[in-house]
Structure formats: structure tokens, C-alpha cells
Image: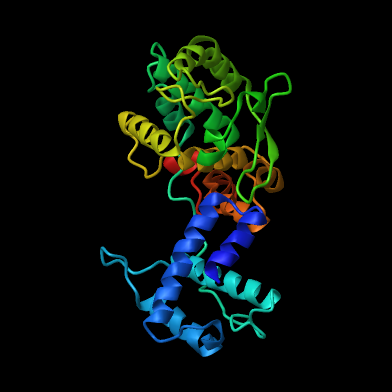
């Protein structure tokens, strides 16, 4: 049943990464059921699913750390989706997961945000006199200017940059949704330097089958890989003396936080970041300390004035 469900999900257009993780979660669930003699779909009851949920809550990673609530929720969501599909397709009469409640997830703030000075320090790290250094500077500028995700940057094609309009087309972002985001003049200029001086040379390394469409290429002339991107950007953060955790995503958090500090509306940020729910974007209202500091200075009864220091 799992294989048939995954085939149906693939036909519906689910992302490859989503299907891969869902397959792993469902294989684990099937193994758990098998060790308990639950071999048929009809053996699954609300009570069985509650036992599985309790087992997940008690389980630990290989290194001993307990499963996070987000991980537990992902595993249970895979099971819920499977059983909902089985009910719709008449493989089950009643959905045993209909009332299964997922673990409540904490609303966490971004782990780290850079200051403007820190960003500029990181941007200056790549050696723009080298091919890969100039490429990396262009990548950093695009990330900082647009706030796009790692996989969205990796997926950019040449045609996605509209310099005349100052816009970047993001194809199939999270949730497989397209969107258009603004991109600043500085990021465009660095990208064109990369296109003029670097991309053609990198492209020649991919012969006889060059990568014709990808915007950012690897040292071998292929579309740059997400893992390689993470490694290189982390190195630049370290070189800049930044000890805050993060690599690619830190630029997304930084852009959103600094723009909100400067007065950007939360709904505009929601559209730029590609968030399906406004509540996801609202974390930046909690990160934006500059506004709170201004209010605190202006209104707190214990604020100091020049006279009190004389």
C-alpha cells in the first residue's frame, strides 16, 4: 500500500525530497507495525496510532538525543497522509488517524541574525580576483538582496534574472510555488560581473555536455550543489570572524529582520519570503529589536537624560 500511495503522491506533483522523506517515515512505521504483528491496514486503530505516537516520543536518535517534536510531527504526518489516502481510495472504511493530534511545535525565533556591518564583512571575504571567488560574491549578494532559500538559489536559471525590472523569478520554491521577488542593483551588478567574466569559463569545463541553463555553476561547470554552497558560505562566515550559527539561511533571516527594522510591512515580507502563512513571517516582528529599543528609549520612565549625568 505504501508503494502505491507514493506513486499516487508523485503523480500529484509532490517534490522528490518530500517523497523521499515520506518513504523513510512510512518504512519505519511499517517496521514498527510488523514487530507487533500488525500486518494489515485493517489492524490499524486509533489506539494503535496512539501507541506509535508514544513510542516516537520515547525514542532517541542514534547519538542519544531525543527526537524533536518537529521530527515526531513529520513522521506522524506521513502516516496521517497515507491513511487519509487509503480512506479516500476505499482501502479503508474509516480513517483511524482522523483525530490523531500532532505534537505542538514551539515557535522558535531564528537562531542568528547578522548586523549590517557583519554582513558587509562576510561579503568582502570572497577573493573576487578568482573565478570562484567572484561567483561566490555574486551568490552572497543575491542571497542578501532577495532572501531566497538555498534550494531556490541552486535552482536559478539564466532566464530567471530580469535586470531591467530588478526582479528575480523563483521557480517552484517551497511548496512548489513560483514567485517573483525584487533584487537590488548591487546584486545585479555583481551577478553580471560573474556572467561576463566567469560563467563562460566554467561552462567550458563541462564539455562535451555543458550546463546551458543554470545561473550559478560549480568549478566543474555544472549546476552548483546545495551542500557545496553551504560549505563555502560557512567558510566565509568563519573567515569573517562570525561565530553565530548558520550559513545560507542566515542571510534570509538577516534580510527579513533588517528590512522589518527599517519599516518593511510584514505582509510584503511574507510575499518576498514565499511564506504560505503570515504567522511564519511574524517571527521577524519578535526579532526586530531596533523598534523595541526606540520605544523603550522614548517611553520608559527610568530613561536617562543629559541633566541626570551632570
Total numbered badges shown on the rendered structure:
0
Quadrant in the rendering for residue 32:
bottom left
- The chosen color scheme is rainbow
Which corner quadrant holds the N terminus? bottom right
- The residue lying at 67 percent from left, 53 percent from top is 276
Quadrant in the rendering for residue 42:
bottom right
Q: Is residue 191 left or right of residue 36?
A: right
Q: Measuring from the top left, give residue 128's x and y in whole percent.
A: 42, 15
Quadrant in the rendering for residue 146:
top right
Q: Measuring from the top left, give residue 59's x and y in whole percent.
A: 34, 74
Which corner quadrant holds the C terminus? top left
Of residues 152 and 112, the one nearer the viewer is 152
Q: Measuring from the top left, give residue 149's x and y in whole percent.
A: 54, 41
- The residue lying at 51 percent from left, 72 percent from top is 76
- The residue lying at 40 percent from left, 80 percent from top is 34
Of residues 154 and 282, the one nearer the viewer is 154
Q: Residue furthest left?
A: 63
Q: Measuring from the top left, give residue 210's x and y in whole percent.
A: 51, 20
Q: In this view, does 281 lie to the left or right of 34?
A: right
From this viewpoint, is residue 69 visible?
Answer: no
From this viewpoint, is residue 165 visible?
Answer: yes
Q: In this view, does 144 lie to the left or right of 63?
A: right
Amino acid at each position: 500500500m505504501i508503494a502505491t500511495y507514493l506513486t499516487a503522491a508523485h503523480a500529484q506533483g509532490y517534490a522528490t525530497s518530500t517523497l523521499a522523506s515520506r518513504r523513510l517515515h512510512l518504512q519505519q512505521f511499517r517496521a514498527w507495525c510488523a514487530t507487533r504483528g500488525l500486518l494489515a491496514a485493517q489492524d490499524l486503530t486509533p489506539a494503535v496510532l496512539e501507541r506509535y505516537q508514544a513510542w516516537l516520543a520515547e525514542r532517541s536518535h542514534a547519538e542519544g538525543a531525543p527526537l524533536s517534536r518537529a521530527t515526531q510531527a513529520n513522521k506522524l504526518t506521513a502516516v496521517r497522509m497515507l491513511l487519509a489516502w487509503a480512506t479516500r481510495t476505499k482501502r479503508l472504511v474509516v480513517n483511524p488517524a482522523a483525530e490523531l493530534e500532532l505534537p505542538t511545535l514551539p515557535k522558535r525565533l531564528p537562531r542568528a541574525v547578522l548586523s549590517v556591518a557583519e554582513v558587509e564583512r562576510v561579503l568582502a571575504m570572497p577573493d573576487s580576483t578568482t573565478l570562484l571567488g567572484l561567483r561566490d560574491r555574486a551568490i552572497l549578494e543575491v542571497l542578501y538582496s532577495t532572501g531566497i532559500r538555498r534550494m531556490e538559489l541552486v535552482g536559478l536559471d539564466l532566464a530567471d534574472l530580469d535586470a531591467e525590472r530588478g526582479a528575480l523569478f523563483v521557480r517552484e520554491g517551497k511548496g512548489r510555488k513560483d514567485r517573483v521577488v525584487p533584487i537590488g542593483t548591487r546584486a545585479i551588478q555583481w551577478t553580471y560581473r560573474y556572467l561576463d567574466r566567469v560563467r563562460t569559463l566554467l561552462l567550458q569545463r563541462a564539455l562535451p555536455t555543458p550546463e546551458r541553463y543554470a545561473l550559478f555553476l560549480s568549478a566543474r561547470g555544472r549546476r552548483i550543489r546545495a551542500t557545496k554552497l553551504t560549505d563555502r558560505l560557512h567558510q566565509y562566515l568563519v573567515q569573517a570572524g562570525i561565530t553565530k550559527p548558520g550559513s545560507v539561511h542566515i542571510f534570509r533571516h538577516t534580510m527579513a529582520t533588517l528590512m522589518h527594522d527599517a519599516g518593511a510591512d510584514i505582509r510584503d515580507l511574507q510575499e518576498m519570503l514565499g511564506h504560505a502563512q503570515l504567522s511564519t513571517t511574524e517571527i521577524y516582528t519578535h526579532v526586530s529589536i531596533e523598534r523595541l529599543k526606540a520605544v523603550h528609549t522614548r517611553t520608559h520612565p527610568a530613561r536617562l537624560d543629559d541633566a541626570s549625568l551632570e
